[in-house]
Image (spheres, grey):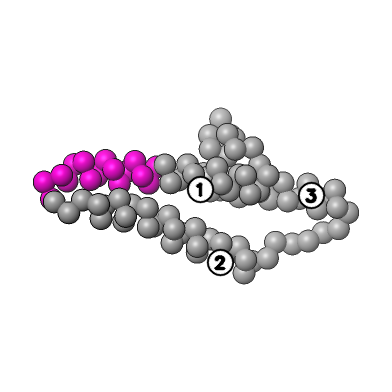
Amino acid sequence: MLSVYSQLDIERAHMKRVVNAGKERLPNPLQAALASALAFCIGAMLPLLAAAAFQDKKYHKLMLGVVAGSSSLGLLAFGAGSAVLGNAPVMRCLLGDA
């Protein structure tokens, strides 16, 4: 849901720039696909790296907490980064249309 709102805010900001520039430019689908694939790969590495830090199985519950925490912080960071890159309000992107 967060990525949908971020994308919507990015598109709105882009349309404002297009109107202000006086010419219409459409987003590049190849660039969007590559950016999405890169973000997915980096986002997938966060919980894997967090889990890799725990070699001993007796810390299973702690590992789950660290993986969940690192994933949540990663999502917040990516959401904020998307908002900044798209010239959209960061808090609105993180909280949605509350």
Residue under label 2: 34
97 or 78: nearer the eye? 78
Residue shown at 43% from the left, 55% from the top: 43
Side (left or right) of 26 relative to 73: right
Disc 1 on helix, strand or loop? helix
Side (left or right) of 56 relative to 71: left
Kindly tell me whether residue 8 is visible in this rendering.
no
Question: Dot 2, how many residues are within 10 Å of its Cα: few (below 14), some (14-19), or many (20+)?
Answer: few
Q: Which of marks 3 and 1 is nearer the N terminus?
A: 3
Name above or below for residue 86 compared with residue 41: above
Residue under label 1: 78
Image quarter hosting the C terminus: top right
C-alpha distance separating marks 2 and 3: 23 Å
**Residue 56 percent across, percent down from the top left:** 13, 51
**Residue 86 percent across, percent down from the top left:** 65, 48
Residue shown at 37% from the left, 46% from the top: 71
The magenta span reads 57-72
Q: Is label 3 in contact with label 1 (beta carbons under 8 Å)? A: no
Q: Earlier in the sequence, mark 1 or mark 2?
A: 2
**Residue 48 percent across, percent down from the top left:** 31, 56
Disc 2 on helix, strand or loop? helix
Name above or below for residue 17 compared with residue 23: above
